[in-house]
Amino acid sequence: MNDIQYIGEWLWAGQLGNALIALAFASALLGVFSWFYTEKNVSGGWFSWQKAGLFSFWVHTLSIVGIIGLILFLLFNHRFEYHYVWQHSNKAMQMKYILSCLWEGQEGSFLLWMFWHVVLGAVLVFTAGKWRAPVMFVIMLVQLFLVSMIAGVVIELPFVDFKLGANPFILLREHETMRNMPFVRLPEYLSKLDGRGLNPLLQNYWMTIHPPTLFLGFASTVIPFAFALAGLWRRQFNEWIQPALPWTFFSVMILGLGILMGGAWAYEALSFGGFWAWDPVENASLVPWLTLVGGAHLMLVFRNKGTSLLWAFILILLSFILILYSTFLTRSGVLGESSVHAFTDLGMSGQLLFYLLFFAWLPIVIFTYNKKLRNNYVLLTVCLFALTVILGFNVYVTIGYLVFAGFSIFLLVLNFRKYFPQGEKEDGFSSREFWMFMGALVLLLSAFQIIVETSLPAFGKAFGEVPGLKELFPKNITSSSEVIEIYNAWQIPFAVLIALLMGVGQFFRYRETPMKQWLKDMLISVLFTVLVCILALSLTDMFSRPFYFLLLFTSVFAISSNFHYLAAFVKFKWRFAGPSVAHIGFALILLGSLVSAGHKKIISENKSGVVNLEALNEEFKNNENILLHKGDTVPMGEYMVTYRKDSVDGINLYFAVDYFTKNEAGALEKAFTLFPVLQTNPRFGNVAEPSTRHFIGSDIYTHLTYVEPEKITKLLAEADPNSPKPEEMTDQFKEIMHHEIEDGDTMYTLNSFIVFNGLKSLSKIDTTVASDKLRLDLQGLFVIGDTKGNRYNLNPGLAIVNNAYESYPALNEETGVKIELLSINPEARKVEVSVMQKVDAAANDFIIMKAIVFPGINLLWIGCILMVLGSGMAAIARIKKKH
Amino acid sequence: MKKSYIFLFAILAVAVGIIYWSVSNAGAFASFAEARKAEGKEFQVAGVLNKDKDMIYDPTVNTDLFTFYMIDKEGNEQKVNYKGSKPQDFEKSEEVVIHGKMDGDVFVAHKILMKCPSKYNDTGSEYKEVSMN
């Protein structure tokens, strides 16, 4: 079919791109083998595996950078013949968003991830020293998997075909959703094409800075993982800790920053109604961070005391595996209907699952030092994998995997008993490392709870048919509707424990601490905390719930005791200040979330919702949204608010809402104006963006929840100079119902009910007239009732003349209801009616808005900054210590 | 007994507690038929909006009441009262998931998730945007 000569396509770019992808894949493959043989010390005579490893790494780096550069080049030149360019950009887009276009799609985000791996790899090539070969081996192995995600190659096997990855260089006219379109037959299709464009919601600076930070965070977790694997491989169980430490803290810092940026973005620019929503996508990046923080602390414990090595291994290895698990959860579509947020399924779920399982499996293989056992284990794995490929996932294969997982754990325990350094001296209760160890375990449990709750729909899919497990995880299981309460029930107690440990931990010495000294150190902070708590309790009733109070107490205690430590012991020397600063930051985040999320107040609440005629649930009387008619001033919380005017800027509609407070004389004084935004976009849908007034103590956060579509159309038309001025609406009525009804039916509008009492014939049927000359006059008998108990009769007419209908609608002025009879169906004894409601032009001019007060959110922001700063300081201090 | 075993035991106990708690409080996807059978019990129902029937949202009367009809995956239709304002572009939704429970003959929802075709992927229908004349 491809004998069409298309005009103007840059086919060379795609060929170059695919060549670069092939090169990236080949060099990663060569890298894996080269670094493997370098580590194995295999000599190739004149040939040096190490040189091959370095060569392949640089070739790989160049190809990844080349692929990214090429996509940017295509985006820059609007080459819409490429599906990725067409999908993520258009001609009207500003060039400053070109990077956002690059990583908006999955293919681009995988590229971003690979890009950070090669950047980090380049640093490691020069700094990893004697650990270079095994660490680079792991990184190249990870790259090999990632490159396959953008390969877009179809592998044909006897039983099934596999599509490997989604290729960013696929042509628009060859893309599976496009190739059957008629336009792809036109040779000159390109000249008329414009791209679909970047979602306007993503055209802001957050989209420019958040994904690169988050993906650097993801990418950085591979380094501690690689060092830990290298330690296992060389049976140098202790030595990897020292070089991996600064990287672990770097990872804690960047991943933490990426997560917090996501929260800040949600709060500032999206109308999710808060900083953190426990959405699967958010959880997926939080969980590895928690285990990484735990692992980082255990690495410190080991370095100082030589204990907790096993758990340090477990947590560090787990962190990277959890990153892969998160990627799988959010990008494979297994969460399905439980999140709107998750990415679309690009048909890579199998590949992502394989990626995850491979890197969970790899440490076990490396740890199995017994050659025979290892070979058998690998053989078993290959068999199981082949079985999966042939049979696909069914109950028996799933059971096979479960048995295999059990066997793997058994193998791990076996290896642990045989090879791992045993007989660690146990830490005493009065040593710092004991409490750090406890802290890491609490973090692990906290992560476990989040991942279990988030994964429920996936568990249902995996185990829904397995006997014994399907009772626990039935097929239709999903996260609870009240999932936030479930998270709070677990995570608040965990937070209390963490804050307590952060508070007391610093004052324990490594090894033993004299009790008397410790109590003395504690006293000041405890006194200060008690004082703050008394003050807080007397000022507000926020902390009346026991766990809220406990969290207040422990987090204030953590802040004060770490500050005390910083002042009295560290004496503000920056090299040692990192941990205290980070702890103060984390405690502030806990306190800030408790105050802001736990005590947010919806001030647009209206507890006197009009009771409808229909028997409504009690719930519908407590409204969270407020209706603002243009020009009216209504009370909202402690303010009087007026929706004053609207303005249009491009696709954004701004609604000016003035806030007034009463001054001493009792007169209203304008305090401030907020401009909540409605972004209108025919392709991506309308989106509300919040507008927030920041105070030191609290924020007032508002966003639109509803604007009449007619109003939006009108505003956009008025602002557009090219559009013809809309004619004054002559039709003042809006159809609210359209039904076929029969005698005795009742219809409900929101403020009235309408009973149909049948049709009355007004004319006698004259049988002498031919049927096509017949005129039949009918009248509908309706009774309208309103909320005040009034009843009105309404009699619209319908005439049948020459087999056609003539309608005579009737209006009831009191309720504004107009009824029109449209047709009758004598066999079914039904009448088609249209019910219209009079539209009052002024009454239509309103917005519906939600307003929430978040107290203490600034504590959260300060906490975020301090925590990131503190982790960074710790990372730098570790690098300095190393030299 | 070594301290580390006690910890291991404690961790396992908490982990089992977490799983038990999660599972016993878990939500469930269901059809309207199942939701009707267990009136008052919380369910999550996936389906599509019945675009042929009226959607009623009159904020001048009640800002937090939006009524619509939905068809679940088994093809059963159900009237739904959602507590909240009408979501933007609701009529364009491709798939709707509602959280709530049956109350008499009405499903009372407190949460709506909707998927719009254009936001998440590109289907052929979207191509209409590109003019070809």
Image: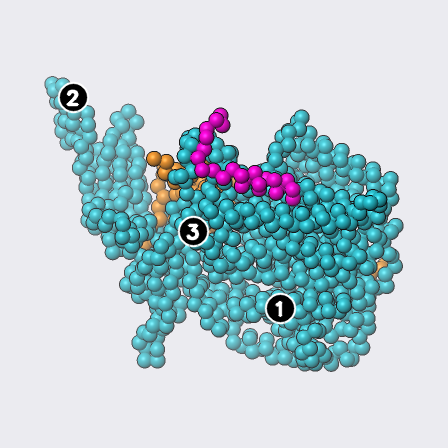
Chain colours: A cyan, B orange
Q: Chain of mark 1?
A: A
A293 falls in the magenta region: no
Disc 1 residue type (three-letter): Leu
Rendered location of residue A558, percent (x, y): 65, 72
Name the residue that disc number 2 marks. Answer: A772
Q: Secondary structure at mark 1?
A: helix
- Residue drawn at 46 percent across, 28 percent down: A4
Magenta-span inclusion, residue A9: yes
Q: Residues within 10 Å of mark 2 (few under 14, many from 20)?
A: few
Residue drawn at x 37%, y 72% as measured from the top left: A671
Q: Which residue is mark 3?
A: A93
In the rendering, at what x and y percent does residue A538 appear?
54, 77
Q: Secondary structure at mark 3?
A: loop
Q: Nearer the viewer, residue A99 or A237?
A: A99
The answer to whether residue A211 is visible is: yes
Q: Chain of mark 2?
A: A
Mark 3 to mark 1: distance in Å?
Answer: 35 Å
Disc on res. A869: 1
